[in-house]
Amino acid sequence: MKFVLDASVALSWLLEDAGPGQAYAAGVFETLKHASSVAHVPVTWGLEVANVIAKSEARALLLDNRSQAFLSMIAACPIRYDGQTHASALGETLRLARRFHLSAYDASYLELALRLGLNIATLDGDLLSAARRAGVKRLDPK
């Protein structure tokens, strides 16, 4: 199964805040364990993840050893960075950000899902709402 993976889902694997989306995020992680699964992400995904890790460590909300274990875990996941993110940034991504009142970062996930014809895995309410209005379905982990 191929899908677009929002950083909100992956970061919940790290932060485990036990919020209402935790079960969904766990289901997405289980989906990634299937041999045919591939998560597609915009090229900025790693920067988003790194930013949350750095800020969480600086606030002593996260220990370095936990961060390293998480980084090892995601390195083993079938995650594919999209090479066209920047080429779309000032065109389609910006158009989607304007249309749905999203950050450019969130719009890059929607643009990727639309371009590749994939479902999206997200815990972000605004992104999910925009995706639905654009005809993109939320991944249903099984």
Image: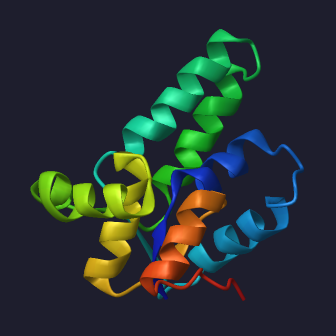
- Give whichever of 138, 83 is nearer the camera: 138
- Residue 87 in percent (x, y) is at 10, 57
What residue is drawn where x is 44% and y is 68%? 78
Q: Is 83 situated left or right of 103 in this image?
A: left
Asked whether the viewer can see residue 30, the reply is yes
Q: Is 126 situated left or right of 109 in this image?
A: right
Q: How is the image coloured?
A: rainbow
Asked whether the viewer can see residue 108, the reply is no
Which quarter of the figure has residue 111? bottom left
Image vertical order of residue 111 relative to residue 134, above or below: above
- Residue 10 in percent (x, y) is at 60, 53
Image vertical order of residue 54 relative to residue 134, above or below: above
Direction left: furthest residue? 87
- Residue 76 in percent (x, y) is at 49, 58
What residue is drawn where x is 21% and y is 57%? 85
Image vertical order of residue 39 relative to residue 69, above or below: below
What residue is drawn where x is 59% and y is 70%? 129
Which quarter of the figure has residue 125? bottom right
- Give whichever of 96, 81 is nearer the camera: 96
Q: Is 136 situated left or right of 64 in this image?
A: left
Quadrant where the image shows the C terminus = bottom right
- Residue 4 in percent (x, y) is at 44, 71
How many numbered discs, if any?
0
